[in-house]
Image (tube, rainbow, N blue to C red):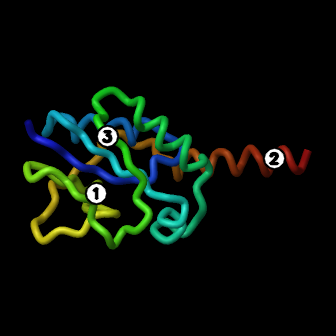
Amino acid sequence: MTSGYVTASFDLLNIRDLDVISQALSHCEHLIVGVLSDDCIETWHGRPPVIPLDERAELVGHLRGVSEVFVVHDPTVSPLLPSDCVVFAVDGEAPGFKTTSPPLVIHPTRETQSTVLRQALRRITDTAVVA
């Protein structure tokens, strides 16, 4: 059985995240997903997450095809993965995994991502504060 590993924040789970999972699953039978901790998100993206870590991990764990979920607390430490594991990099980035062999790059085809959702929420919040 081929295993795959992908890491992301999965904050404000969206169609782009589902596209990443779907593409990864097309290359493996057993998908392991690393969910970045709050500290990792702040370091990697320069902002805190909106959704609490335990909820993000639980949501990802309930996605069809996801076999295992774990939290990535230190992106400089690679998780212990099966020997047949394929590492996926989303748009060339693979936070939470350092490898000597190049990862398989996934380019999501769906555009909505948490950054867009976050901007929309900010506009709604700003409008509500003014009113």
Left or right side of 79 for 15 = right
Type of amino acid under label 3: Glu
Q: Which residue is drawn at 64% across and 45% down?
A: 120
Per the model, the C-alpha gap separating discs 1 and 3 is: 22 Å
Q: Mark 3 points at which residue?
A: 68
Q: Is residue 86 visible?
A: yes
Q: In this view, does 111 lie above or below 102?
A: above
Residue 127 badge: 2
Per the model, the C-alpha gap separating discs 2 and 1 is: 33 Å
Q: Which residue is drawn at 47% across and 65% down?
A: 40
Q: Label 3 near label 1: C-beta < 8 Å?
A: no
Mark 3 element type: strand
Q: Which residue is drawn at 34% across and 53% down?
A: 7
Mark 2 element type: helix
Type of amino acid under label 2: Thr
Residue 91 badge: 1
In the picture as drawn, the residue positioned furthest to the top comes out as: 64
Nearer mark to the viewer, of 2 and 1 = 1
Residue 120 badge: none
